[in-house]
Amino acid sequence: MFESLDATLLARFQFAFTVSFHIVFPAFSIGLASYLAVLEGLWLWTKDEVYFALFNFWKTIFALAFGMGVVSGIVMSYQFGTNWSVFSDKAGPVIGPLMGYEVLTAFFLEAGFLGVMLFGLNRVGPKLHFFATLMVAVGTLISATWILAANSWMQTPAGFTVNEAGQFVPVDWWAVIFNPSFPYRLVHMVLAAYLTTAFVVGAVGAYHLLRGDAPKRAKTMFSMAMWMAAVVAPIQILAGDMHGLNTLEHQPAKVMAMEGHYQSHPDGAPLILFGIPNSSEQRVDYAIEIPKLSSLILKHDLDAPLAGLDTVPKELHPPVGIVFWSFRIMVAIGFAMLGIGFWSLWCRWRGTLGENRWLHRAAALMGPAGFLAVLAGWVTTEVGRQPYTVYGHLLTANSVAPIDAPAVATSLIAFIVVYFLVFGAGTFYILRLMGRLPRDPMPDLAEGPLRSAGIMPAAATPSGSRHHGH
Amino acid sequence: MAIDLPFIWAAIIAFAVLAYVILDGFDLGVGILFPFFKEKHDRDVMMNSVAPVWDGNETWLVLGGGGLMAVFPLAYATILPALYMPLVLMLLGLIFRGVAFEYRWRTRRGEFLWDIAFSGGSMVAACTQGVALGALVQGIPVEGRAYAGGWWDWLTPFSIATGLALIVGYALLGATWLVMKTSGDLAERARGYALKAGLGTLFAMGVFSLWTPFLEPLYFDRWFGWPTLLFSLLVPLLVLGCFALLVQGLRTRHDSRPFIAALGLFVLGFAGIGISFYPYIVPASLTIWQAAAPEESLAFLLAGALVLVPMILGYTAYAYWVFRGKVDPEEGYH
């Protein structure tokens, strides 16, 4: 039944499916590892047990998410060879060493210290344990750096020549790593990971504030998350804008697809807010647009001319519809995050951060927003790179492995079934853990007089519950 | 050429693969032995004995794969498509095995499911790794920088035999690991399984030693040509020595000796395969020099590897040292 399906299309779908599942976990664990390091650092510094309780709460969730990231990541490191062998043969000499450095500098570091971080506190003591937590956090950031260097090189390749076997051969490693889009992409992704985590932590805090079951811990994490949202969301929008300008310079066709600009606009291009891209007619149907705003955003000049996809041969167009929509989803979520961040600042200033139930409801709703934005952003940049794997140099159609369509179809179905089963179960366990903020027997953690009284009637006074152990 | 970079890299990749086989071998072996220990308490201890280190162990597999792409891209681009099905199955097995480490503690009702995922995933991963090895030893046809065979070529009696043998071999590593890391009844029963798996491993090594030379003229020349014949004569003696050490260690209830003897068996088997292959990296098709990346790539990554691999070995050793000694049944964060 799969004979009619194109093996290349199946391989692309398999890569898109497995990498989309995978990116969700690093996006979360990069941010969460840093958050854990901050929590443990605050605990060691202030000796406030609330930070230690939060550290333990998020540590278990981190272990689950990290485990899912590891197993889905190994699939990626083999899929380049199993399904994209021609790409691997040609581009391996350039991006292979970048990924090799990722393994050597990041994966081993994370894995080596993860065990100590999860199981070793009683064995190594708090200081060395904090060091292990820091190493895990640093490892996730180093990992992001290398893999984004590799991805950015595929988007904006630099520092290479091509040898007689058709392989990309590095000439200048500095130029390979610091290729034109790398700094922008790295900043944009790391900030995205931090925002994603902030909104997850914020949602869990908001949920427990709404339930009122552990006010002190819930408020602490909610407040920390909202600081993050308020500070990072505006920076992220700025970074995204700069990333967009960089893309305009190096991958103009991608920006044309993002903007829905099929036609060139010699004197000021409109910003299309919404519409339905119609690639067969090369126009956007039902477009709602603001005149000249696109030129203002991209060129900082209302009347600047902007070229459209009519200047690009049709066989080199990226799929406009996907890129157009994924970009709008990402931007909309970004502005919603900005809105929550500012709202939280307002409530904080008014002193109602812990009480404003509408803010809590909105924040709880925004819990998965970061994941959606990360996925939408990656779809924009990866689909926008089409029809190339190495932009401008190697076509996707010429990158694929000589695997028969039935084999790819079989593995694709297996991946889909297993991923939904395994990562569905994992997501369920994570959500259940998030929903349970277990009461800690330590007296310092008593959440307030009423609760203490409920548990320990004998110590009805708050001071009594605070200073005497069991 | 002053420095033979492909040769150095072949040695490093071989080291990474050996490190993976040994380290994840005992993790997977513990999973393979899960069905033989029905008690929840035993299973908890077994899993906790590898929980702090499995992730680091599996990272050697990523280094083996990712490193191959960096330094022998043509080998990566021909071996992986040739082994498509076994590798996809291995990855799926490793997914089930890997997530079970965390999921198992998150549910009471579904615990048995993740026990099955842990042991089933371990068995599938071990078997498919053995199949992949067998298929590689059989040889992989390459034409014009691409794999030139079909997607069922890997499936032969030889590769099935190597797949089953690796399950037994990993079970030996797992059982001797449990002898070293656990105590009481659990360790006692692990001794029994270690002896059985040890006999099985010895038998498998004997069978493959007789079978391999007749697969490929190159191997025959290697095994019975001069001076490699010396090695062919020496290895069986060393293998018997390791086996004797294993049996003696189990008899005298020594903690670590059986594990060290099992490691010895694996190192000898691995060296035997390596010497049969060399200088081919894709047997009968590509030598390490034909498959190597350009010198710029090899040199760039080697500069880092020379500094980083010793550091990795250092802090990995530290992580093992932190969790040294017998597993305390009451410990664990779960």
Image: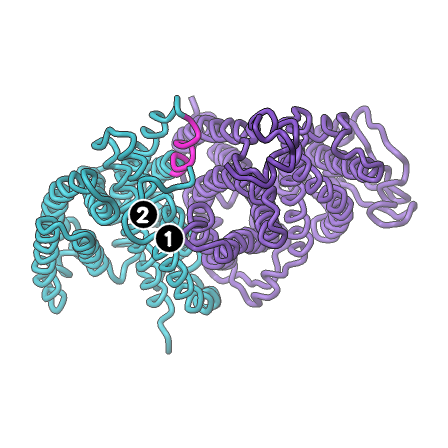
Can you name the residue that lies furthest to the bottom here? B2
Quadrant of image for the N terminus of chain B: bottom left
Image coordinates for residue A241, horizontal then vertical, percent: 77, 47
Answer above or below: position of A174 versus B164.
below
Answer above or below: position of B114 versus A138.
above
* Along the line of sight, the residue nearer the viewer: A169 or A350: A350
| Three-letter amino acid code at the position of disc 1 | Trp
Query: Mark 2, chain letter?
Result: B
Coloration mode: by chain
* Along the line of sight, the residue nearer the viewer: A185 or B179: B179
Q: Which residues are magenta?
A: B98-107
Instruction: Reply yes or no: does residue A339 show up in magenta.
Output: no
Mark 1 and mark 2 in contact? Answer it, CB < 8 Å: yes
| Left or right: A393 as drawn, with respect to A252 | left
The quadrant holding residue A57 is top right
On whether disc 1 and disc 2 are found on a single subunit, the reply is yes
Quadrant of image for the C terminus of chain B: top left
Q: Which mark is residue B60?
A: 1
Please name the predominant secondary structure of the magenta segment in the image. Answer: helix
Does the image show residue A282?
yes
Q: Which mark is residue B24?
A: 2
Instruction: Reply yes or no: does residue B101 show up in magenta.
Output: yes
Report the label total. 2
Task: Report crowding for label 1: few under 14, some 14 to 19, many 20 or more residues within 10 A (C-alpha).
Answer: many
| Left or right: A376 as drawn, with respect to B10 | right
The quadrant holding residue A336 is top right
| Left or right: A376 as drawn, with respect to A160 | right
Chain in purple, by letter, is A
Question: Chain B hue?
Answer: cyan
* Mark 1 → mark 2, Cα distance in angstroms: 8 Å
N-terminal of the two: label 1 or label 2?
A: 2
